[in-house]
Image (cartoon, grey):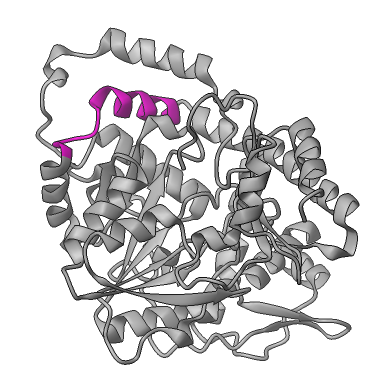
Amino acid sequence: MQSERNETKTRQVYSWIRDRIMQGIYKAGTSLPSTRELAKELGVSRALIVEVYEQLTAEGFLEGKQGSGTFVRDIGSSTTLRLQPEDRSYRNEDISPMHGDRSSYIDFRPSFPALEHVPLQKWKRVALDVYHNFPPSMLGYQEDMAGDMELRLAICDHLLHIKGLHCLPSQIIVTAGATQAFSILGKLLLTAGETIAMEDPTATFIHNIFAETSARIVPVPVDSDGLCVEQLPTDVKPKCIFVTPSHQFPFGSILSISRRLQLLDYARNAGAYIIEDDYDSEFRYGGMPIHALRELDTERVIYVGTFSKNMFPALRLGYIVAPQELVESIVQLKRTADMQSPVLSQSTLARFMNEGHLKRHILRMKRIYHKRRTHLLQALRETFGENVQISGDAAGLHLIATWPGRSADLLTAKELEKHHIKIYPAERYTIRKDQHNDSLIMGFGNVNETQISEGIQVLAQFI
């Protein structure tokens, strides 16, 4: 309980400073008090202020100048932000394949969870209780195709606790994973010849989903601050923009606050919707998870979440948090796709979440993933020394390893597969080719320390 109170206090201080920056009370260039001074003024620990300053720096609100202190950055907003409401009134609302036997493979697949640590015994107990008490009337088609109301309420609580994101259950549509969510949104927002702007590189399956709409895909590069907003198209107004702002896939960068505001301005001027994919940012290894882009604008941003990373992929449950004006259209497309997501799975997940099991599982997995991440970092540095550059490791279940001037391409991956090692060249995820032939996307979620060490030793023979 003490840690929960500390987390609540941290969010309060974070919001207090951030809102003053947003409102222009703390203007660009303003020098903030030292962590010791502010801690004394607010009556909190200095460690809490340090954590808040680090969070705001990571999101682009602040910058530290050595020997001078901490200053407010110019975030350059031209539009008043539509921030989330602070009430919780929603409670009263009327409501890549691997063929053959690959068990011996060491697979550095990115953004893939540790399947051996899925809390199956707890899941089974909850599922049996749900099945035992499930009324026969619930075994037919459900009237509300948006999903089980208990689960949608649990998702609201989860997003509020993990991401500080406020939403109503009426805005949530439960889907068959994020894959179905993107498919539905592609059908809703795009027709042949219309334009979608997408991060480049991006997840291959997502690119393929939107390509099936016959829309024009405009790739937009990313850098250490996320999507390069200034390179969004000016010759055409896209119908939607796809981004992973909290942990860019696959490069791991965070979309800075200045670019978030620029992106929102661009979307409003273009009349475009932003599709925000938040796939694994819960697993952040320093400070709180990065806040969602949707928190800044509830009308332009469509938020997509999944339980494939924080639970397990076979569960096949995800969700959309949509602007109210789009909800009915999304529900109708969901109806034509599969009528509804499996009711028993939804009920089990809702009960699992409400009993606190998901929250405890995420905390446990953060410790396990942190240990595996540290081991992978150490193995790479001990093996390759200064020849390897590592980035994108602040959150999620993978990192990026780059060998400037050396090849880490698809041919290398094919050679390593002969030695039962699966690696994932960055080039595999690019829309414009021949941009990142020297980088690997290395997942550490579903490989243990022994496998990591063995895999890096074999990798060293080819790079």
The image shows residue 192 at horizontal and vertical percentages of 16, 70
- Of residues 241 and 259, the one nearer the viewer is 241
Our reading of the magenta stretch's main secondary structure is: helix
Please indicate, yes or no, whether residue 117 appears anywhere in the rendered image.
yes
Q: Is residue 74 above or below residue 286?
A: below
The image shows residue 423 at horizontal and vertical percentages of 63, 47
- For the point 36% across and 71% down, the residue is 297
- Of residues 184 and 383, the one nearer the viewer is 383
- For the point 55% across and 40% down, the residue is 112
- In this image, 288 relative to 24: left or right? right
- For the point 29% across and 61% down, the residue is 210
Q: Is residue 410 above or below residue 234?
A: above
- In this image, 281 relative to 129: left or right? right
The image shows residue 54 at horizontal and vertical percentages of 71, 66
Answer whether residue 410 is magenta in the image: no
Kindly indicate the quadrant of the structure image that contains residue 267. Answer: bottom left
Q: Quadrant of the C terminus?
A: bottom right
- Of residues 148 and 330, the one nearer the viewer is 330
Kindly indicate the quadrant of the structure image that contains residue 113. Answer: top right
- In this image, 437 relative to 432: left or right? right
Q: Which residues are magenta?
A: 338-354
- In this image, 407 relative to 271: left or right? right
The image shows residue 311 at horizontal and vertical percentages of 49, 33
Please indicate, yes or no, whether residue 247 appears anywhere in the rendered image.
no
Q: Quadrant of the N terminus?
A: top right
- For the point 44% across and 48% down, the residue is 159
- Of residues 76 and 40, the one nearer the viewer is 76
